[in-house]
Image (cartoon, rainbow, N blue to C red):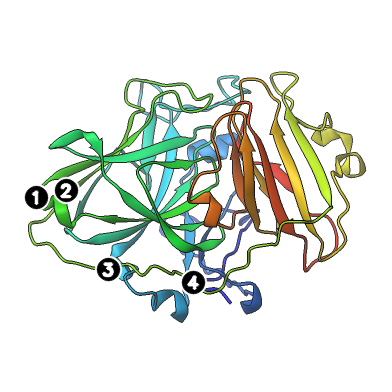
Amino acid sequence: MGVTPALHLTAGPRTPPRLGSTRTTTIRTDRTLARSGITIMQLTTRPTTHILVKAGLYILHDDEEQSVPGLPQDAYDIGLVLASKRYNSDGTLWDPDTNGEKTSVFGDVFHVNGQPWPHLKVEPRKYRFRFLNAAVSRSYQMYLVADKASNTRVPFTVVGSDAGLLDSPVPATQLDISMAERWEVVVDFSKFAGQNMTLKNNRDVGADQDYTDTDKISKHSEDEVARKCLLTATLTTASAFHRIGSNNRASAKLGQPGSTSQTINGVTWASGPEERILAKPQRGNVEVWELKNGGGGWSHPIHIHLIDFQVISRTGGRPVLEYEKVALKDVVWLNTGETVRVIARYAPWDGLYMASLNDET
């Protein structure tokens, strides 16, 4: 059906690889469920580990995805892992546990693939960038500018999401991405040969705390010779969108009554599995769930495990973004005060489907 199998690993190796060593992971996928996508491996849910180690991603391909006309491949298909770190005065990474931080770790130094504010030399042609937000608490609203026209945002094309390729490419000038979300974009550098470009971040994003340099992410410089590459109007024929009209409904209101406790419908993790059950869909049911951020000044990405969903409405702030309308997702960003409705089919497995908040607040 799809083009690149999508997989989400919610737990990783118990013992991290030693420096200089390698580890092979064998992954089996169900071809009937496949769509184009990238995946993340979380080593732990402890914020200290997210701060002190580098996050990585798997990129999975198949022949159908690699045959999409105009979709950059190989050296022009680059994964970019975003993180936001904080350092001590001696250059060591700041440890939230040691410093008694129990709410948020926004960080004032942006990393991309483990490097602070890196520089990437590119050719003046199209590139595919697969973004993963691996920050502990920070969301981004990213945009690209050329140094010779710093007040004009450079357009790009969104082509993929958490669950894989969009049904069709969507033009945009800003990419919103919260913790654990994945978005894929195609940027055409052909008109900017010989120029420098900067990937920037909005100020006042959600509930995030700004610092001096949290408005910039990375820089790109172009060679002189331009190359053309036309992107197809249809990315995949493997549409798995659900039909709206189901009478099955559930709601989840996120709350933060204290500095260290998060709640969903007033229930904490410590309440136990029976108390934490939000709904009991029958296997194969298509259900609409309402997710509400009622936690005051907090920003929450929420992840429903083992299924993909569509975002069908958002109120209280941003609308449904144009590229969200044609995307299947497994993480959705609930900004401060927002309410989102999603629709999903709960199959093929029986048992508990976990929903989690993919931030460390």
Q: For the residue marked with disc 3, what is the amino acid?
A: Leu
Residue at image mark 3: 230
Q: CA distance from mark 4 to mark 1?
A: 34 Å
Depicted 180 relative to depicted 261: above or below: below
Q: CA distance from mark 2 to mark 4?
A: 31 Å
Task: Compare marks 4 and 3 and give the one earlier in the sequence.
Answer: 3
Labels 1, 3: front one: 3
Task: Compare marks 2 and 3 and give the one earlier in the sequence.
Answer: 2
Mark 1 residue crowding within 10 angstroms, few (<14) / some (14–19) / many (20+): some
Q: Residue furthest bottom?
A: 63
Q: Residue furthest front?
A: 245
Residue at image mark 4: 236
Q: For the residue marked with disc 1, what is the amino acid?
A: Gly
Task: Compare marks 2 and 4 and give the one earlier in the sequence.
Answer: 2
Mark 4 residue crowding within 10 angstroms, few (<14) / some (14–19) / many (20+): many
Image quarter hosting the C terminus: top right
